[in-house]
Amino acid sequence: MASNTLIESEFHAKFDREIVTLSPGDKDVTRSHGMIMLEDGRLVVIDQKNRCMKIFKPPHYYFDSRKNFTDEPRGITCCGKEEIAVSFADKQEIRKFKINQDGTVYNLKPFGMQEKPFSISYNRKTFAVEQGEGRYGSIVILENDGKESHVISGASRDFGLFTGNTIRLAHDNNKRVVYVVDIVKGCVNHVSYDGDIKWSMKVISPRGIDYCEQSNILFVASKSDNSVVQMQASDGTIVPFLTHDSNVFQPRFICYQNQAKKLAIEVGGNVVNMYKCAKK
């Protein structure tokens, strides 16, 4: 188990603006199920309820364009300068897209999954995907083309309950480790590709997670605590970061973009708060 030692944050964040994720074409209230930022700072939000993804363009983050889906998107990750991947559980499929500067979205070659995919992460030409439910649940490591390289069985439920709604992922392929948010048990787990748990750290009602590989730091949203914490990826040490005083209210999904030096936090359902965020 990791210690509860508190140290000073390595990052500084300043509130920039509030982005309302409602957009033309919506038939229902937005129900976001993840978001990413591209290197140029564009924000991409997947809306499960309206079955679409929405693109918001800096610096003011006005709505730019959308792509409608026939199926419900469940997870999203950035997998290139202008490329993203979206999981579709009901179709057991990961679909890849390229988003041009003019907002045009092009379909790239998708790949199928053996089980329903949910949360998804990308790092160093690999995907980590939460797939399946119950005793069939696992975390699978895939190559860029969808070829399976590792499977971490979730049958023991030691690092997460596989329901499709209670796990969030980030991973580091170089270190061969997955960082798993277990929403049910209220913790973040460091899990090797072999399934070994190096550390487990309690976080109050954890939700979204993102990983800054350059600083070996995890950003984790704490919903009921109205906060975002940093964690040292090496040992799980918690570092206080943003609180209710920084306009953080019931955060769910979160994404950090190192090149753009920005942090986006979903708050209050259909609002995303954007922060300028960089190392001190």
Image: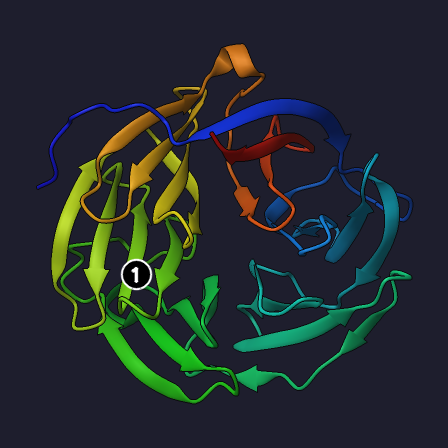
Q: Position of residue 96 (x, y in %)?
A: 65, 75
- Can residue 203 be seen here? The reply is no
Q: Position of residue 171 (x, y in %)?
A: 36, 61
Q: Nearer the viewer, residue 149 or 224?
A: 149
Q: Residue furthest top?
A: 245
Q: Nearer the viewer, residue 182 or 220?
A: 220
- Vertical arrangement, residue 166 with respect to residue 85, above or below: above
- Vertical arrangement, residue 233 with respect to residue 207, above or below: below
Residue at x-position 80% and y-position 62%: 68
Which picture quadrant has residue 39? bottom right
**Quick one: quadrant of the N terminus?**
top left
Residue at x-position 70% and y-position 25%: 16
Residue at x-position 46% and y-position 62%: 121
Q: Position of residue 82 (x, y in %)?
A: 71, 67
Q: Nearer the viewer, residue 260 or 46?
A: 260
Task: Look at the numbered disc 1 and give the secondary structure of its residue.
Answer: strand
Q: Residue furthest front?
A: 280
Residue at x-position 48% and y-position 85%: 146
Horizontal relation, residue 34 to residue 114: left or right: right
- Vertical arrangement, residue 164 with respect to residue 127, above or below: above
Q: Position of residue 17 (x, y in %)?
A: 73, 25
Which picture quadrant has residue 66? bottom right
Horizontal relation, residue 254 to residue 29: left or right: left
- Can residue 106 be seen here? The reply is yes
Rendering colour mode: rainbow
Q: Which residue is mark 1?
A: 178
Residue type at mark 1: give it.
Answer: Val
Q: Residues within 10 Å of mark 1 (few under 14, many from 20)?
A: many
Horizontal relation, residue 151 to residue 275: left or right: left
Which picture quadrant has residue 101? bottom right
- Vertical arrangement, residue 184 with respect to residue 52, above or below: above
